[in-house]
């Protein structure tokens, strides 16, 4: 069991990571749980994300957001939360979360688990998405499909709605349905006819040739520049539903104007809530929810004692070692003798000096840490010259900080500084 958190954030997409930034800057003890399945990771390049006029890929965007959250002291754990339970019967008793064999306790939970698209059965699916031949969000990227030959693939009723939306971008829009004859939808059929949108029969197969997607329709292959797969989505709302949270017919969670679900202390943001699945919507949800969380929790006044005692400041201690095994032994000693959770002690190894580039960190056994925008604002050249193995330790109160600092002083290596962060 870990120490009680003010808030646990389940999900590390744009909404979850924005929540981490806000709550860390509110000086609240939090943990973010990242299952690694954010829908944003499917974005090859977004041009409607505010602040990136030249576009940015989903993975790069999430890496920047994670670095920003960590710079304010946010702790991000990789893995999946398997269950959430109430700690007691009272509304303010908080929650217990099961994660990778560890139980975390938290006063509040922000659920940012999102949704997942139903994918077409297609060999080379990931390559088709990466090349933008296969897309899922007309609101996001229809501008990049102007005047292209577009297919909308999905149940006829849903495909028709999206085809009409796309008709403002191209004169060549075709519905490739999965289920029904257009004659079964006479009202939509009239609107489609007026817009000049044709519909095919249900295809026998779908393929990808490395550049474009095609369908086998009535025995012939028909190729399109862009295919929008509108096959539906599945809300990742199971954790909230297990607590009794209310949802709509599609499983999207119902929330109030402060992003509160029907379960006291449980908030929900982003695609698990909204039918308009947009990065800007998720980040707006996060700002609303986390401000509500902060205002609902007891204040933590600085320099006082009692129920409103000052928040335990997270600080970051850093120490460099010339040898990786020395740094590894130091890390093990801090976990065993210092009573620190393993997640609060990071071991990073810089690349060899000959081939090192700023931000090429590895953690533990060599897994990439993606530190291109260094969250701890280290002077890379100084680290490189003094020792290439860096031990990063997070402490959460003055007493623990002083004890761990004394332990580090008694070890070999060179101090890389102390960075005050947030809870």
Image: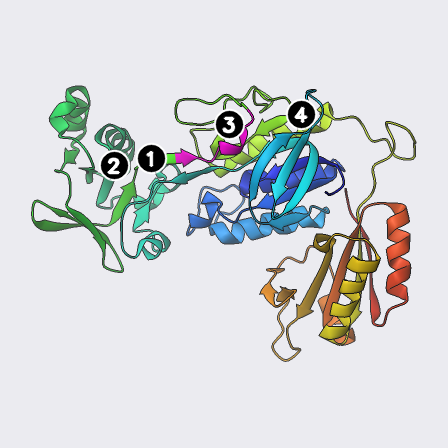
Which of the 4 image quadrants contains residue 142? top left
Q: Does the magenta stretch include residue 111?
A: no
Find disc 4 in the rendering and name its residue: 292
Q: Is mark 3 on a helix, strand or loop?
A: helix
Q: Is residue 236 magenta?
A: yes
Find disc 1 in the rendering and name its residue: 232
Identify whether 51 is placed above or below 300.
below
State how far apart marks 4 and 1 are (Cα): 31 Å
Which residue corresponds to the image point at 78% horizontal and 74% vertical from the top-left? 386
State how far apart marks 2 and 4 are (Cα): 39 Å
Which of the 4 image quadrants contains residue 200? top left
Residue 138 in sight here: yes
Task: State the mark number for residue 241.
Answer: 3
Circles 1 and 2: CB atoms closer than 8 Å: yes
In the displayed structure image, the side of residue 75 where residue 396 appears, left or right? right
State how far apart marks 1 and 2 are (Cα): 8 Å
Q: What element carries label 1?
A: loop
Q: What element carries label 2?
A: strand
Task: State the mark number for residue 367.
Answer: none
In the displayed structure image, the side of residue 129 where residue 285 appears, left or right? right
Which residue corresponds to the image point at 72% horizontal and 25% vertical from the top-left? 295
Give whichever of discs 2 and 4 has the lower sequence position: 2
The magenta segment is 234-243
In the displayed structure image, the side of residue 59 where residue 26 appears, left or right? right
Q: Residue 70 at what x, y percent from top left?
A: 68, 49
| Nearer to us: label 4 or label 1 | 1
């Amino acid at each position: 069991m870990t120490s009680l958190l003010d808030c646990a954030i389940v999900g590390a997409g744009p909404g979850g990571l924005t929540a981490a930034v806000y709550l860390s800057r509110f000086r609240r003890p939090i943990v973010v749980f990242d299952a690694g399945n954010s829908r944003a990771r499917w974005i090859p390049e977004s041009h409607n994300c505010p602040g990136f006029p030249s576009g940015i890929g989903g993975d790069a965007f999430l890496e920047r957001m994670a670095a920003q959250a960590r710079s304010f002291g946010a702790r991000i754990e990789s893995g999946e939360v398997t269950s959430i339970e109430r700690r007691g019967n009272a509304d303010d008793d908080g929650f217990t979360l099961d994660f990778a064999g560890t139980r975390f306790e938290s006063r509040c939970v922000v659920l940012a688990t999102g949704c997942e698209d139903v994918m077409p059965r297609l060999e080379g699916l990931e390559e088709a998405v990466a090349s933008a031949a296969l897309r899922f969000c007309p609101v996001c990227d229809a501008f990049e499909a102007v005047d292209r030959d577009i297919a909308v693939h999905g149940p006829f009723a849903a495909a028709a709605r999206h085809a009409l939306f796309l008709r403002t971008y191209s004169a060549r829009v075709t519905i490739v349905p999965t289920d029904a004859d257009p004659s079964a939808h006479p009202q939509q059929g009239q609107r489609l006819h007026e817009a000049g949108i044709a519909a095919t029969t249900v295809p026998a197969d779908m393929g990808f040739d490395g550049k474009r997607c095609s369908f086998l329709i009535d025995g012939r292959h028909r190729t399109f520049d862009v295919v929008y797969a509108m096959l539906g989505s599945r809300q990742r709302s199971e954790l909230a539903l297990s607590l009794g949270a209310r949802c709509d017919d599609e499983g999207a969670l119902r929330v109030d104007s402060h992003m509160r679900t029907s379960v006291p202390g449980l908030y929900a943001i982003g695609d698990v809530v909204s039918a308009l699945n947009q990065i800007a919507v998720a980040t707006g949800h996060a700002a609303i929810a986390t401000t509500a969380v902060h205002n609902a929790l007891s204040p933590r006044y600085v320099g006082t004692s009692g129920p409103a005692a000052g928040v335990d400041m997270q600080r970051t201690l850093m120490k460099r070692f010339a040898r990786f095994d020395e740094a590894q032994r130091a890390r093990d000693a801090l976990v065993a003798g210092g009573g620190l959770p393993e997640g609060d002690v990071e071991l990073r190894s810089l690349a060899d000096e000959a081939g090192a580039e700023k931000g090429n960190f590895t953690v533990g056994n060599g897994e990439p840490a993606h530190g291109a925008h260094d969250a701890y604002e280290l002077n890379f050249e100084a680290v490189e010259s003094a020792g290439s193995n860096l031990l990063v330790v997070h402490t959460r109160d003055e007493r623990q900080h002083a004890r761990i600092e004394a332990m580090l002083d008694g070890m070999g290596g060179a101090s890389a500084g102390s960075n005050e962060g947030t809870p």
